Image (tube, helix red, strand yellow):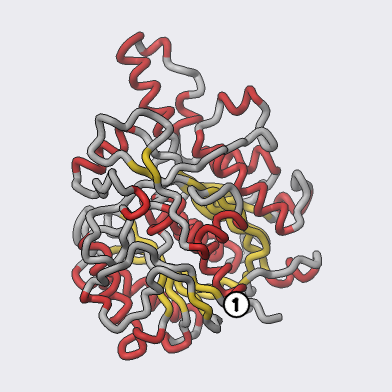
Amino acid sequence: MSAPRVVVTGMGALSALGNSVAATWDGLVAGRSGIRTIQGFDPSRLASRIAGEVQGFDASHVLDRKDVRRTDRYIQFGLVAAREALDQAGFPGRLEGELAERTGVILGSGLGGVTTLFDNVLVMAERGPDRISPFFIPMGIANVGAGQVAIAFGPTGPNFATVSACATGAHAIGEAWETIRRGDADVMLAGGMEAAIHEAVLGGFASMKALSTRNEDPVAASRPFDEARDGFVIGEGAGVLILETLAHAEARGAEPLAEIVGYGATADASHITLPAPGGIGAVRAARRALEKAGISPAEVDHVNAHATSTPEGDRAELQAIRTIFGEAAGRVAVTANKSMLGHTLGAAGALESIAVIQALRTGTVPPTINLERPDPAGEGMDLTPSRASRRDLRIGLNNSFGFGGQNAALIFRRWDA
């Protein structure tokens, strides 16, 4: 029996550009940066004092005041994005019966509840271990976000978290796709969430020399593919997709937004932070996704690049794109959303999957902003500098790569029912 076709019927997003899919997408298309000097705490001790923070966030429609105090910010992000996605897909406030049993959740976070973790470590150091919050563990561990979505909305199918650094969200979507294809669920909520803008996290990344220190010009700090790039800018947010079999969507009258047709996952087995030479791990992930999709590289119209704005990472990805597409590399429309969102770590692959779907639906490729002097490795490529472009897009590839050499590639097809 062949695997079922899997479509996307709902999406939810939170980012530095807005607290919904529509607001985030509008900001991306406009080329608007969400990066600014950190407002959530005093960043004066840090080498990198800028971030893509979510503004005006409110979880009161999914959590009461008591539960807001008992859930970390990353969990709240996941709940709000999941609710938006469920609403768009036309699901009820709470799933019941067979629908609940045949619906699962795979939502990941690269770092989990880091604010909860660090705050309670300080409590222990200053006041002793007996003063640690009883909610310390369930607020801090990375899997509870997926569990809380089930508690809030009712799905009782497969439920777990992926944790693969910056590939987390893409791995979650890919594994949810496979869960449906093998018959373990009809519907899956999938994606990533991250709320890691904390002094200790930025201090750690800064000690690795991974962050941009362009503090005096935050809007211009994230510069994917630009020769003047000096590191990534941390961001926060969430992205959640509703995946379901085409037959299930049709039976309930839901409108597909796109079809997910391919997924590949590989390891570099090379270095804890640097990509494998030539981006060969990314190449193998994309080729595996293309093989599963049954399509050739020549059919891909659009690439949403991982493109964090680090010197080595961006160069390796450009080399990988050239290897994947060969002489046709200049024909593919490439974009780098992190130029505006910052790097949302575990949420990046999910937010960028939403951007791919929106690009396919609208025929619009968001720009890569701050791209003034392209890296020579991208010579002849269409990196969509400065302004959005209009294109006839049918197939989109989303790249995601994580520390540890973990790579994920997702392929989406425009829905032309």
Asked if residue 399 can be seen in this view, the reply is no
Front-most of 133 and 390? Answer: 390
Residue 311 appears at what percent x and percent y? 21, 61
- Element under disc 1: strand
Relative to 145, 65 lies left or right: right
Q: Quadrant of residue 400?
A: bottom left
Asked if residue 372 can be seen in this view, the reply is yes
Relative to 47, 417 lies left or right: right
**Which residue ends up furthest to the front in the rendered image?**
216
Residue 156 appears at what percent x and percent y? 66, 46
Q: Residue at x 54, y 81 (%)?
A: 393
Residue 71 appears at what percent x and percent y? 55, 30
Q: Which residue is drawn at 40% across and 39% down?
A: 196
The quarter of the image holding the N terminus is: bottom right
Q: Mark 1 points at which residue?
A: 414
Front-most of 200 and 244? Answer: 200
Mark 1 residue type: Arg
Give the vertical position of 281 relative to 338 (above or below): below
Give the vertical position of 6 relative to 23 (above or below): below
Front-most of 246 and 126? Answer: 126
Residue 225 appears at what percent x and percent y? 29, 67
Q: Residue at x 39, y 66 (%)?
A: 368
Q: How many labels does the image show?
A: 1
Relative to 16, 2 lies left or right: right
10 Å neighbourhood of mark 1: few (<14), some, or many (≥20)? Answer: many
Give the vertical position of 297 relative to 266 (above or below): below
Q: Which residue is drawn at 36% across and 27% down?
A: 118
The quarter of the image holding the C terminus is: bottom right
